[in-house]
Amino acid sequence: MGSFLERFRRSAGVPASVGGDISAELASVFLALDEIEREVGALREHSEAAAAERLYEAEAEAQRIVAEGRACADSERDEALRAGVQAADAEAVAILRRAGADAEGIRRAGEQRLPRFVDEVLARVFEVAP
């Protein structure tokens, strides 16, 4: 190959000997180019296959992440709902306790006032009665 290239070093870039043996000299170059083309083709196929595999893996990972996110969101939503229900239950219990205490206060006030009202009603009845 070195002797072949040496012939092109002249300023015109034309091989030193032109003729029938040039085909034989170039045949080895073209054979080498053919081998390079085969290697490039194999590399391209390998690269395309690797890219397709990475794309498939990335899509699968993205689907897994989305599914995990949905599950997490569902879990968080359920937890928030449970917390809201617990808070509402606690508030309802507090309201019922306050209502019970208010009812007890009203009952006691009624018990305390009842004798006075009975006395007042009886006094009016006796006033009106002949």
Image: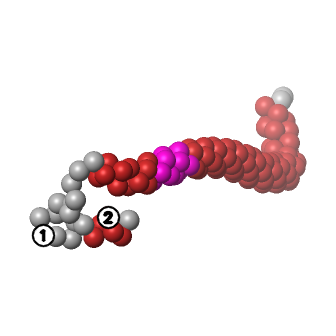
Based on the picture, tell me whether residue 80 belongs to the magenta stretch: no
User: What separation in Å lies between label 1 and label 2 (alpha carbons)?
Assistant: 15 Å
The answer to whether any part of residue 109 appears in the image is: no
20 sits left or right of 114 in the view? left
55 sits left or right of 82 in the view? left
Q: Indicate whether 15 appears above or below 11.
A: above
- The stretch in magenta equals 35-48
Q: Position of residue 50 (x, y in %)?
A: 58, 50
50 or 41, which is in the foreground?
41
27 or 101, which is in the foreground?
27
- N-terminal of the pair, mark 1 or mark 2, is 2
Secondary element under disc 1, as helix, strand or loop, is loop
Residue 93, label in figure: none
6 sits left or right of 71 in the view? left
Q: Position of residue 51 (x, y in %)?
A: 54, 49
The amino acid type of the residue labelled 2 equals Phe
Q: Position of residue 107 (x, y in %)?
A: 85, 48
Secondary element under disc 2, as helix, strand or loop, is helix
Determine the image quadrant of residue 12: bottom left
* SS majority, magenta: helix
Number of numbered tags placed on the structure image: 2
The amino acid type of the residue labelled 1 equals Ser
Image point 12% across, 69% down: which residue?
11
Crowd around label 2: few <14 · some 14–19 · many ≥20 (10 Å)? some
Residue occupied by mark 2? 4
Which residue is most to the top? 130
Based on the picture, tell me whether residue 45 belongs to the magenta stretch: yes
12 or 98, which is in the foreground?
12
Image point 36% across, 50% down: which residue?
24
Residue occupied by mark 1? 11
